[in-house]
Image: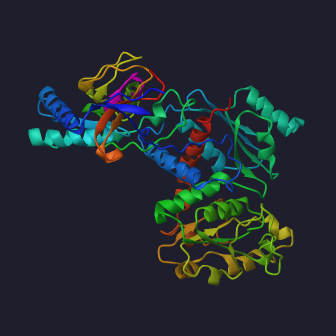
Amino acid sequence: MIARTVLSAEEIRRAVRRIAHEIVERNHGLADVVLVGMRTRGVPLANRLAEAIGEIEDASVPVGALDIGLYRDDIASRAPHVQPTDLPMAMEGRTVILVDDVLYTGRSIRAALNALTDFGRPAAIQLAVLVDRGHRQLPIRADYVGKNIPTALHEDVDVLLEETDGHDEVRIAREEGEQ
Amino acid sequence: MIRATSQEQAVAPRSGDERKWTRQHLLDVDDLSGDEIGLLMETADSMKEVLGRDVPRVPTLRGRTVVTLFYEASTRTRASFELAGKALGADVINVAAGGSSVEKGESLIDTVRTLQAVGADVLVMRHGSSGAPHLVARHVRSSVINAGDGWHAHPTQALLDLYTMRAHLGDVRGRRVVIVGDIAHSRVARSNIWLLSNAGAEVTVCGPATLLPAGLRSGDPPVEEPQALPRVNVETDLDAAVEGADVLMALRLQKERMTGGLLPSLREYATLYQLNESRVARAASGALVMHPGPINEGVEISPAVASSLQSVIDEQVTNGVAVRMAALLLMCGVKTG
């Protein structure tokens, strides 16, 4: 595989801080806001957002983890690998901010929306992603985007995070031999 | 190959969990790898989270059909598979041999072919003959899960027992597990011996010599065939066996063994091999008391022990649903062409 870096560790840090500011600005008071990270890499991102919001607003925003493995529509084509969902409270009446690393076809988000509603009826659901790489297959858009990165279909966007991969970097990778 | 441009560099693919379930059937536990056992246990953890929800149901297997085909009586295993399938959103059809075309003389193979033709994705099967599920697996495209065959194997029972032990003890490596009762005629004992040994536990089987399988009785020549059971400790004195044990598992004593001349009387069996309070007291403190059910209270286990705080018998039943959900989910994720 060959890859080029599209976001450095410093750029990721700044993107997270900017999204945190946007979340604060848009949800005055943050009273009912809960951050829900989508496994795997949405969870550390949600934790970072909560920390950044805490620095800006002196408010503590609860963080949960959502696994969408049981809600995917392609179980036959990929071996299911599921982890427990861990939400800090009922979603009833909350403003839920879903957090994921990459927004691509929108199918994961569709699955996450279905999963979330099994835990109650949120007042609103917003979506925060570190990278929007395009190629949507469903009518889904993000409310907060770290960076829009145009990609080709044969490319992979790898988000590497300190917590899961040892260092922070977003890179575009493709198999050698692919143009 | 295209050379990397200046800001491009060769990298290893981003790491992820590469463990994959590749088995189409779950017929036995003797050949499960450590990774497969780990994947099943972790998946069962997620299933347990689903079962703890207000509405314990997810749509994962919507449109899939699970058929339970039971040629032997069962309450908990069949109900547990049915609940597991429904919690995952599958359609579940229960077929009992009594009342089906089996009574008209339909052969096993014809029955399973019919069930496959009506769209069974997974066949959960219990049969009195050892190896029946293996035979069926060779004749159908559906996944086959062995829910107990003769004296041979009961994979999901052993898996739920291991899951329950891990929930209390963590890693079972080096833990001492005593299985007491009719070892020779028990598929539960056999599957537990295999699975617990593979997981690194130290297994002791205990029972009267007439109820120990060939190869384990004192004086038997050692069995060196590949299908022989793994090495376990054998003890005919329960008081000695329980000393310092971490898990005490009693098996159901089937009363028909009495007529076979293998036991002198129930009372004598209870005196020598019942899990009672004084025996539990000799085990490690906080030792788990387990039983696959159904229980003959006052025979293989005393009522006080069965309902004591150390007893995880009810939990075994609850965990059974989670483990069976994990098995169904993993099987349905395998492409069968």
Q: Residue sitting at 47 percent across and 23 percent down? A: A178
Q: Residue furthest right?
A: B105
Residue A69 location (% of width, % of height): 46, 36
Q: Is residue A20 above or below residue B151?
A: above
Q: Residue sitting at 67 percent across and 32 percent down? A: B336
Residue B179 location (% of width, % of height): 65, 70
Q: Residue sitting at 86 percent across and 68 percent down? A: B260
B49 relative to A46 in the view: left or right? right
B109 relative to A57 in the view: left or right? right
B258 relative to A15 in the view: left or right? right
Q: Residue sitting at 84 percent across and 33 percent down? A: B110
Q: Nearer the viewer, residue B237 or B279?
A: B237
Q: Is residue B288 magenta?
A: no
Residue B322 location (% of width, % of height): 53, 47
Q: Which quadrant of the figure has residue B217?
A: bottom right
Q: Nearer the viewer, residue B62 or A55?
A: A55
**Quadrant the C terminus of chain B occupies:** top right
Q: Which quadrant of the figure has residue B254?
A: bottom right
Q: Which quadrant of the figure has residue B202?
A: bottom right
Give the magenta-colored segment's residue range.
A100-108
Q: How many marks?
A: 0
Q: Nearer the viewer, residue B311 or A32?
A: A32
- What is the image's colouring? rainbow
Q: Nearer the viewer, residue A2 or A65?
A: A2
Decide if residue A70 is in sight here.
Answer: yes
Decide if residue A117 is in sight here.
Answer: no
Q: Is residue A30 above or below residue B315?
A: above
Residue A57 location (% of width, % of height): 9, 39
